[in-house]
Amino acid sequence: MILRILNEFAIDVMSIPNVNDLLWYVAQKVVGKLEFVDCVIYTSNLEETVLTQAAAMGEKNPFGRNIINPLKIPFGQGITGRVAQTREAVIVNDLLDDKDYISDAQPARSELCVPMIFGNRVVGVIDSEHPEPGAYGKAELEILTTVAAMTSAKMELLEETERSVRRYHNLVDSHLQITKEINSRKALEAQLFEARKLEAIGRLSGGFAHDFNNILTVISGNLELLDEVFSPRDAEVVDCLNAARTASEKGASLVRSMLAFSQRAHLDAEIVDLRELVESTLLWSKRILPEVISVQLNLSEATWPTKVDRSGAENAVLNLIVNARDAMPEGGRLDIRTRNVSVAVSDVADRRLTLEPGRYVRLSVSDTGTGIPENQLQQVFDPFFTTKSASEGTGLGLSTVFGYMQQSRGTVTVESKSGEGSTFHLYFPAFLPE
């Protein structure tokens, strides 16, 4: 019978998933079946200074698998503590004659106590008591020692499994951290490359715009002189002059856009209420919005004031409205919102905002249009980039917005998915004098 119980234990122990289940199994289904009257299993803390009652069988376990107020025994105290300290099993034939016996509510007469050891550590103690003296001998000692050895080996295996799981999770966390750092570095490198590219294009555009503006000034001046000479005697010549003048004005507008992108435009800063600015811009821009596009405003009444060039801000909003209109040829909804936001250092990193930490007013323009393909999101603010035909646009609208916002100590960002519309966010620095 003993051999059969130990064989069953050897088989079952392989599938026991944790130490708690193991100890209760040993107490109730191994020691209990080996006809020991009762059994208490103690586990040791890592410092090997205190034993704590972890499982029991018999009179000392009236609550099933629940230990109410588990007994704690310091190493060296009583018979159980002495076994833990000396690492040697003990048989006590008559507890009344043992000075180390700690009397219980139901005093016993015999005791058998064996340590559980693996490696160089005491991991616990198996203790059994009997109401009659001389109840335990070498056979019981050998049986309980075998059970203790098998239990200790399984505990070591479970502990090694836990260590392996922890190492695996640590490796996974380390890999994720490294991946995150690599992705962050790549994102920063891409952001730096984009900033340097736009800076280089800006310098080139600014220099070209200044030189081109000087040429346009000469052309415009000579056109005015020719107009005085020929007007109104030669209608054909006058038509040619008018066409030349129109082209000159378009060139001047192009120069202004290029100067705005290169952040060299002349700005006259004034205190602006963005809520009022949006409403007034919409009033005179309704003629460019077809009836199939509905407009929804969500303008916070508590919007902070900002100090920027009003004309530039109006042009930025108008550019985004036109951009949204063109993205909804079949109609849709245009949403314009304002919101006060505080940008922290962490926000700058997470949102990839080219902003100084501080307080800003965010003006958002959303559409339900065609959206922007992911591979084009990084290009939308490049000068002359456009998906329209040559006759429909210059590709300077969004780049002008970008340059104006940068020169105004703010920024512009975009969120978009193909077929799901786009949202452009303008961040204006709040003007809150103390």
Image (cartoon, rainbow, N blue to C red):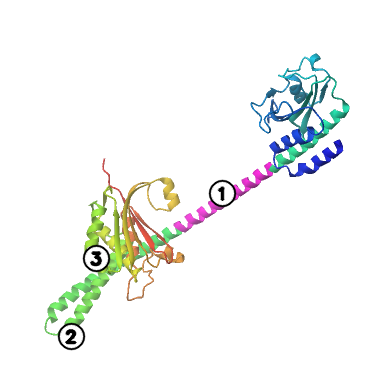
Q: Residue 147 is drawn in which quadrant? A: top right
Residue 218, disc: none
Q: Position of residue 141 (x, y in %)?
A: 84, 28
Q: Is residue 179 magenta?
A: yes
Kind of element beneath mark 2: helix
Mark 3: amino acid: Lys
Q: Position of residue 410 (x, y in %)?
A: 34, 53
| Mark 1 crowd level (few <14, some 14–19, many ≥20, 10 Å Cα) | few
Q: Residue at x 85, y 35 (%)?
A: 2
Say if 35 sits above or below 305 in the image.
above
Residue 236, disc: 2
Q: To which residue does mark 3 refer?
A: 286
Q: Which residues are magenta?
A: 162-191
Q: Residue 382 is drawn in which quadrant? A: bottom left
Q: Position of residue 264 (x, y in %)?
A: 30, 59
Along the horizontal axis of the image, is 256 left or right of 111?
A: left
Q: Is residue 258 magenta?
A: no
- The front one of 45 and 205 is 45
| Mark 2 crowd level (few <14, some 14–19, many ≥20, 10 Å Cα) | few
Kind of element beneath mark 1: helix
Which of pointers 2 and 3 indicates the residue nearer the eye?
A: 3
Determine the CA span between mark 1 and mark 2: 73 Å
Along the horizontal axis of the image, is 248 left or right of 363?
A: left
- The front one of 27 and 375 is 27
Along the horizontal axis of the image, is 432 left or right of 44?
A: left
Mark 1: amino acid: Gln
Q: To which residue does mark 1 refer?
A: 177
Q: Earlier in the sequence, mark 2 or mark 3?
A: 2
Determine the CA span between mark 3 and mark 1: 51 Å
Q: Residue 366 is drawn in which quadrant? A: bottom left
